[in-house]
Image (cartoon, helix red, strand yellow):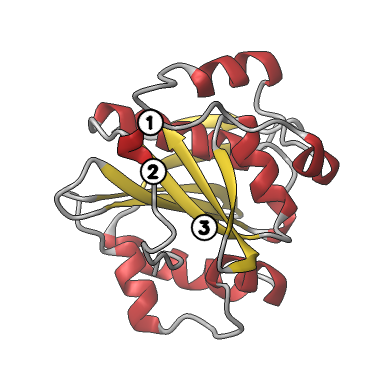
Amino acid sequence: MPPETWLAADGTAVSIRPIRAADLALEVEFARRLSPRSLYQRLMSTRTPSLEELRRFADIDPERELALIATVRAGDRERQVGVVRYVREPSTERAEIAIVLADEWQGRGLGTRLLRGLIAAARKAKLQCLTGTALSTNDAVLALGRKLGFLLEADPRSATVTHLTLDLARAPLLDEVAGAARGDEDVSADEARTGQGARPVSDSCVVTPATPRSPLP
């Protein structure tokens, strides 16, 4: 997948490309610059990711994973400002997703652009379902999910967790329709609480309450 350039509303050029093992230093700096709140929303924990975890984030298995990073120029060097990824579940056409943005890039449309790119790549990989897990207080991610057609469901075992599911087979153009209607503008926290979710998913995309879920590593 070749790199793409996306222009933010203020004219900043953002490069979006697949992550490489050589991007470890970018990933380390990116994680260290995240606020405690952003880290907690990403990991659902107060812990800080270890160097080994960050190495795993950068050195992915291309047979079952994809991670797209967003970078900008910071003087004479590259700086990572966002990442979205999926990990395919073994022996299925499903994948679990995760997204995190640098604090200063939240609410500027980058999340929409990254997730739309991941959805398009998932379709090319013949995946049928994308699933994710977010804190129920993470209004920005819930709004983004609704905008791009994900069905949102509260975890029956914990009111603090919400599951997101996108049935790619049933709604093949849903993200493109949403993008055409709203562009790359991110949605507000109020829309997270009032927006409508996607149509119900097919049986092949349903996760039963007994199926354990956890944030991506």
Q: Can residue 80 be seen in this view?
A: no
- Residue at mark 1 to residue at mark 2: CA–CA distance: 7 Å
- Residue at mark 3 to residue at mark 2: CA–CA distance: 14 Å
- Residue at mark 3 to residue at mark 1: CA–CA distance: 19 Å
Query: Closer to the N terminus: mark 3 or mark 2?
Result: 3
Image coordinates of residue 26 in percent, x first then y, are: 45, 64
Q: Work out whether residue 128 or residue 82 is closer to the camera in this orientation and state it.
A: 128
Secondary structure beneath dot 3 equals strand
- Please tell me which residue is depicted at 68% across the width and 59% down the height of the picture: 136
Picture disc at residue 133: 3
- Please tell me which residue is depicted at 44% across the width and 32% down the height of the picture: 201
**Residue 186 picture quarter:** top right
**Residue type pointed to by label 3:** Thr
**Residue 107 picture quarter:** top right
Q: Is residue 165 visible?
A: yes
Q: Work out whether residue 3 or residue 36 is closer to the camera in this orientation and state it.
A: 36
Marker count (numbered): 3
- Please tell me which residue is depicted at 38% across the width and 64% down the height of the picture: 210
Q: Are marks 3 and 2 in contact (CB under 8 Å)?
A: no
**Relative to 189, 6 lies left or right:** left
Q: Are marks 3 and 1 in contact (CB under 8 Å)?
A: no
Image coordinates of residue 61 in percent, x first then y, are: 20, 57
- Please tell me which residue is depicted at 55% across the width and 38% down the height of the picture: 151
Q: Work out whether residue 159 or residue 94 is closer to the camera in this orientation and state it.
A: 159
Image coordinates of residue 137 in percent, x first then y, are: 73, 61
User: Label 1: which residue?
Assistant: 202
**Residue type pointed to by label 2:** Val
**Residue type pointed to by label 1:** Ser
Picture disc at residue 206: 2
